[in-house]
Each structure stands twice: as structure tokens, then as C-alpha cells.
Amino acid sequence: MIDLNEIQTIEHDVLVVGAGGAGLRAAIETSNLGLNTGVITKSLLGKAHTVMAEGGMAAALGNVDGRDNWKVHFRDTMRGGKFLNVWEMAAIHAQDAPERVRELEDWGAVFDRTRTGLINQRNFGGHRYPRLAHVGDRTGLELIRTLQDHGIHQGMDVHMECIAIDLLMDGGKISGMLAYWRETGRFVVFKAPAVIFATGGAGKAWRVTSNSWEYTGDGYGMAARAGAELMDMEFTQFHPTGMVWPPSVRGILVTEGVRGEGGILTNSDGVRFMFDNIPDRFAPETADSKEEAQRWLDGDREARRPPELLTRDVVARAIMREVKGGRGSEHGGAYLDISHRDSDFVKRKLPSMYHQFKELAEVDITAQPMEVGPTLHYYMGGIRVDGVTQMTCVPGLFAAGECSAGLHGANRLGGNSLSDLIVFGARAGRGAKEYLDNLSGSPNVQQEQVHEHMRGVTDFLNREDGENPYVVVDDLQKIMELNVGIVREGKELEEGIEALQELKKRVANVKAHPTSQYNPGWNTCIDLRNMITSAEATALCALQREESRGAHTRLDFEGEREEGLTYNGVVRLNSEGNLEVRKEMRKDAPEDLHKIAHSTLEELEGSRV
Amino acid sequence: MSERTFRVWRGNQDGGEFVDYSVEVQPGMVVLDCIHEIQKEHASDLSCRWNCKAGKCGSCSMEINGKPGLSCMTRMNTFEEGETVTLQPMKAFPVIKDLACDVSWNYKQNERIRPFAPRERDPDGEHRMMQEDVDRVQEFRKCIECFLCQDTCHILRDRETEQNFAGPRFMARLASLDMHPLDTDDRIQEVKDESGSGLCNITRCCTEACPEHIGITDNAIIPLKERVVDRFYDPLMWLMRKLRPGKKETVKN
Ligand SMILES: Cc1cc2nc3c(=O)[nH]c(=O)nc-3n(C[C@H](O)[C@H](O)[C@H](O)COP(=O)(O)OP(=O)(O)OC[C@H]3O[C@@H](n4cnc5c(N)ncnc54)[C@H](O)[C@@H]3O)c2cc1C
Ligand code: SF4
Ligand code: SF4
Ligand code: FES
């Protein structure tokens, strides 16, 4: 093995892994706090998942409806998350979001405007008021470009196409990271006493997903191997509206903004089926006739919101039910129609949807309905962190954004992710600063560890024969679709977990073409280790939770159960190297927050705090 | 379903060659799907970039039958029956391997542009801008940084002039800053000197290549050129400015 001195070494105070919204926001914070900051990303700068976000960013600015305030946003978030959210995180998120959004304007973001020139806000599922700051249907692009163009002038070093392999530790504390450059296949050691993960989710473990090749759960795998805990992994959000036709685009997202702007869902009989799928909890706040839904769309403030805008779990299950009941659309989805609105309006408000359907499906959405169906979209669960500092149980390791857990509970509201990124990205940055200020001594990088991690990935290149990693990915996706899908059952989950154990053995034996330079096959081998950890953690949590709550639906345990609210599922790697799941009892809700979450809307409206 | 031949450039900075692959094409498939098939079935080490698969991230740029385009938005049914599809990396940038090329030059150009410099917020802590005043800026901000316009522009393809011109992408970015209602910086000198606006001879190839349909030439470059002319070559405007020195001049369309 090569001597450590011969491996390229780069030193930073903080290494941020990920250059999406959360990573860039964290890096801006640490740079501004005077820390030498490095950012690494699997892709080029500006290409992370965040760029794909469409609909908007939730913040109770109250620009469109003055009755909105952080308390209502907090209440919506808790209700959407079926009260399994970490209370403090949901409150901090709602309180910090407006200022984090306004700050983006100082950095050059250009949101759509209201008539008085303020940031415009749109309606979205589960949000009581128009709350999503947006730019047409390309809000994520605006966010990432703003952070990117501002960030590069704050002193951070961005290392593009540099892929993290494993964390380095010294006496239980973080000391750095082993990574490799895609371009050359060479290794690089980052010496850094604090690491912030902003690595996103693990949607690629499913076949039908809105996620890209980057979403292989690298943060989950690496964090678990370093001793951190994963929480709420059973809560995988299936977005109700992914494209279903043609097959090659299956899963690509159709923004909820379509429904926010008045899109309606119908089945093959032309029935607007969401009216028959309104859960009791939301009935008082949901329109019960087409006529009332129309009045809401026309701006009547007394009218209640259309049922198409119920939370994602509810809509996704309703579409599934129609398809299973033989009332699906031609290619096995539901119809989503916005063609009743003015064609120019549709093109202006939803330009990229118009484009996407026109070019990829040859459908003109201003004249024809779209076909949509559920697609794996988002990980509510993730790395367990302290709600204020974003630190994990591993000293020096932080997590923010989609890769962390806690804010969204059992189900995320649309638009609450982009705001999550900027709120908790900034907080993770501050958390890292505080940690470093109090850290005595400097943790060292140990040669033996580096070698071990290097061997773990070079084996894929060096072995004589082994399996094609792409075939193993396909099989993993099949298992997840079949056994850990949108509706789950104990027996299937158990079989799934068993199948994953078998697959793990195959993962250990995959082989890549022996060139290390820009080799996607090798990269897939490396990703697979993390994907399978994420998949297994998801299945274990799903099996443990014997109820249906939010995004987690068990056929054998219908409905929410009281016991389900007493704990969060937590997974960690035990000393034998196996994942172990347990129930972590929830702390009592802080009294003031409990009160707000259970208040009526009238009690909270207009109370700008 | 039909069989299709792809001719893909394989190699790195030391050279390379075209290799033929055959792919079973299913209805609705785009070029990027076929590349994934090739990786799965024939060449697991074939390099190419992609992320969103929906024309939103600008990663998958390449030359498809000699024409710069996004491979994720190029449908297979746009080719003639039996036509061989040739894939190459973008020509204006140094190749890394196969279809991936080194686009870091663009990131360096971007860093050279002075950061956004906003005016103070209003006393109530808000920024106010009217929609009609930001429409044009929003057009430029649609840019997904696919760099296809940079790849097309003959000034950047020419090694001699390359270093003196920021390229259409960054002219559009400068225009978005210059026309931003909140920006207080005066960027016209920068547009002329550092970014070399004068080098563009308005061929409009960049505009044609832009998958976001941004009016790069007519809406960004020409207005910027006009402002440079007004500033540096128009004696009347020069006199006006002397008489009425102000902050940034208001934008003319
Ligand atoms: C199509 C689509 C539309 C969406 N629309 C909305 C919306 O309208 N509103 C909303 O709130 N949310 C939306 N979401 C969700 C939201 O976009 C994401 O949850 C969010 O952008 C995640 O941001 P992030 O910063 O956590 O991670 P990302 O933006 O995904 O960034 C992850 C980063 O980590 C890096 N990374 C990962 N692993 C490694 C590794 N091993 N080494 C180095 N780097 C690594 C990646 O390269 C990347 O830079 C949408 C999601 C999708 C897919
Ligand atoms: S119009 Fe100007 S920038 Fe665009 S391709 Fe022609 S010369 Fe290049
Ligand atoms: S201006 Fe258009 S062609 Fe140029 S980089 Fe941006 S999106 Fe691509
Ligand atoms: S993969 Fe994102 S634009 Fe093609």
C-alpha cells in the first residue's frame, strides 16, 4: 500500500459533503464565520438535486395572505408530519424560514413578485395559506444558482466531482474524510476536524423515482459506518404525481404546483376521486364540492381548499386505489388536468412542465390531461441530529438537508424541503463553528484507517471476476419495489429483509472494469454499499412500525395507533457490523409548542410574532 | 422496439476512436437512455454526465450527430429510421474521458464576474421589485449552465480569441446583473474590457443552441453592446453623464 505521504492531502477546518442547497448554505455560513471551508460534490457545481426542485420554498412571509405567520406554518408542518416531527426543529424551521428567504434576495435571487412588488407565494398541499416563494416552476434552480454565485465569493474551496468514500476518525471524533476524484480515479485525504453531511436521500434504491444517480444514500452509509444513528427511515415519500408514460420517463416529477394552480385529478370514469378520499382530520379544512373548490381557486377567502391539495401521502394512496380498482388511466396512473385554465397562464406559471410533457411525452398540457402516478421522491428520515446544532452523536459530524431526519416526521409538506435546506444548512454551519471553538487538540488522520477504506473500494477494480454492478442495482430496485413499496405488509417486509441479506453478499462481490479514471461502473460499485445500507435501514424501520402513519402504510396494520406516536425508529450498526433497529422514546412536547400545534386556525391567525 | 447503432467516441486526452454499439430502442426513449443501456450491457466504464434526465440541470450536453444538444431531451424518434447516431463530447472543451469533458474554464469565467451588489432594503426590511421589471432578468436566470452556447460560439472554439471573450453564457449572466433592479454596480466597463463584448459578431448560433430558449444574442448581448457604445463611443451620452452624474443608468431595452 502507498504511504500516506504519497496521497494528496487537503486541509480544511470544515469539510462540507454536498453542494445542494443545504451544503452550499452551510458552507456560506462557515466561510462567513471565518472557517477554512471545503465543499465536495459528486457532480459539477450547480447540478445537485436541488436544481430540480420546482414548486417553491415554504416560508410564512405573509405577503399574499396576511393571516399567515410562523405558528400556522409550524402547525401545518406538525399535522403534515402526523406529529412525529422533532418539535423544536419544526418550530425553528417555521421561525427562521422567512429571514433565510429574504436573505436570498440580498444575494441576487429573483422570485416572482406580487402586485405590490413583494415576493409572491403560491398554494401547495398541506399549507394553509399561499406560502411558497417561487420562480415559475424552477425554484430549485434559482436557489442553487443564487447560493452558488454568492458562495464562490465567500472564500470557500469547491472541489467538484470529488466523491466521499468514508469518514476518518480519531478517538471517536471526526478527523477527516477519504475521497476520490472522478476525473482521475485518484484518492485524496481531507484533514478536517468537522464534517457536515448534506448528501441528500437514497431514492435510487427504487426503480420508479424522481431522484438522480447521486441519490444512493452515501451520507447514510458513511454515517452509519462511523457510528452515527439513522432515524425514521420507514418514512419514504412517494410523490403522487410522477410521469408514467412513456416508460423511459416513468418517475420523473410533475410538480405539485400543477395542483396548486388548479389542476384536478380524475380517473378513467372522469370522476374527481379526491372528494372521496378526504381524511377526517382534514375534513373541516377541505372543500366538499367542486363548486367550493372552484370558488377557492377564484380567490374566495372563505372557501376551503380543493382535496387535490391534501398531503402527498393521502393523494398518492388515493391514486393507487383508483389504479388497483381498475379505474386508472391508459398507462396505469390517474389523469391530471390543468387545461381548463388559460393556456398562456399555464405556460407562464408552469413553463418547465409544459416543456417536459411536450418534449418527452408529446403531450400539450394546455390542451390535454397528463398521466401521473406515485414516484419515490424524498426521504423524511435520515441521519439523527440534535435539533439545534445539527450535530450527530459522533463528535464533529453534522448533517443538514434531506440527509438529516427530524423536521418532517412521517410526511413532508411540499416546499418544506427547500426551506429546510437554508434554515438548517445555516444552523449546521453555526453548530460546526461552536464545536470547533470548544474542541481541544486536533484529531489526527491514521494511515491504517485510510488504507483500510482504500482497500474497501479498490477491491472492486482488482478482482479477477465478479458480478456486473448494474445487475445488482436492478435487483435491489426490484426488491424495494416489491417488498418495501408504497403499501407494505409484515410478511413481505421480512422476505425483503432476507433478500437484502443475500444481496449484500453479492454487493461484496461486484466487479468494475479496471480503469479508475471517470468510471461509472466503479462508482456504482461504491454507491451500492451505501444504497444497500439505506435500503436495509428502511426495511427494518418499516417492519418495526406496526401502524400506518403518514408516508408509511401497512396493510396489516391500518390506521394510526397511539403507541406509534411514542417513539421514533432508530437504526445503528452494531459491533458485529449488522444494522440494529430500536424504538427511541420521544420526549414530551414543549408546552408552548404543544399548545400551538393543537390550536384552531382562528386562534393563530394574524398573530404575527 | 427496434435495433439501433450508436457510434460513440471512446478515449481520453491521449486520443481515442469511435466504437459501435447496438441498442434495443423502446418507445419514448431518449439518447441518454441508450447510453445507460450501453453502460449496462456493453461498456460499464463509458463516461458521461447526467443528473435530472429532464432538461433541468444541464449536465448531459454532448454533440449528437455533430450538433450540440442535451442527450436527455433528444428523443430517439427524431432520427431517421436506420440512421446511425454518433455521440461525441463537446468540442470546445478539453476531453476528460469518452463523453465527459473539462468544463472548468466556464466556472473560472463566472468567478471573474463581480458579485451582485444590492441596494439597501426598504425601511420595513423588504425589497420591492415589479414583475415587469424582473421578467427580462428571469429569462436569463433560466440558464441551466449546459454550456452548449459556449460550445457553439466560434469565438470560443478559436484558441486565439478564446481567452478574451467570456462567452454567451456569461454575457447573459452579466446582462442579468446589469438589468437587475437591485444591483448598484456599474458593469459596463467590465462588459467591454474583461468580458470582451466587442468580439461577438452576432451570428446568433448560441441562441439557436440554447435548450432554454433564452434570447442570448438579442436580449442580452445586443443591449449590452449598445450600452458599451453609448458609454464609450457616443459623445452626446458621454456629455450627458458628465452633466448629470448618477448611479447606475436605467436600462434601455
Ligand atoms: C424533481 C424534484 C422536485 C422537487 N421539488 C421541490 C419543491 O418544489 N420544493 C421543495 O421544498 N422540495 C422539492 N424537492 C425536494 C428537494 O429538492 C430536495 O429534497 C433538496 O433539494 C435536497 O437538497 P440537499 O441540499 O439536501 O441535497 P442535494 O441538493 O441533493 O445535494 C446533495 C449533494 O450531496 C452530494 N453528495 C452525495 N453523496 C456524496 C458523496 N459520497 N461525496 C460527495 N458528494 C456527495 C451530491 O453530489 C450533491 O451535491 C424536489 C425534489 C425533486 C427530485
Ligand atoms: S452571437 Fe456572439 S456569442 Fe453568440 S455564438 Fe455568435 S459570436 Fe458567439
Ligand atoms: S444560456 Fe442556454 S445554452 Fe447557454 S449555458 Fe445557459 S442554458 Fe445552456
Ligand atoms: S440530465 Fe439534466 S439536463 Fe440532461
Image (cartoon, rainbow, N blue to C red):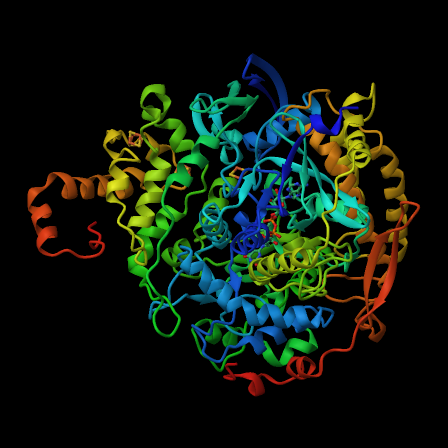
Tell me: B51 left or right of B113: right
Q: Nearer the viewer, residue A222 or A54?
A: A222
Res. A373 visible in picture: yes
Q: Residue at x 36, y 42 (%)?
A: B113
**In this orientation, which residue lies closer to the viewer: B205 or A195?**
A195
Where residue A128 appears, as percent x and y from the top left, is: 55, 74
* A327 up-or-down from B209: above or below: below
Residue A276 visible? The answer is no
Figure quadrant of the N terminus of chain A:
top right
Task: Say above or below: B222 vs B241.
Answer: above
The quadrant in which residue A164 appears is: top right
Q: Residue furthest bottom?
A: A603
User: Left or right of A538: which side holds A417?
Assistant: left
x then y, percent, for residue A37:
58, 47
* Front-lying residue, A275 or B132: B132
User: Residue at coordinates 78% horizontally, 58% vertically from top-left?
Assistant: A393
Q: Relative to B141, say whether A508 is above or below.
A: above
Q: Position of residue A310 (x, y in %)?
A: 61, 68
Location of residue B12 by image quarter: top right
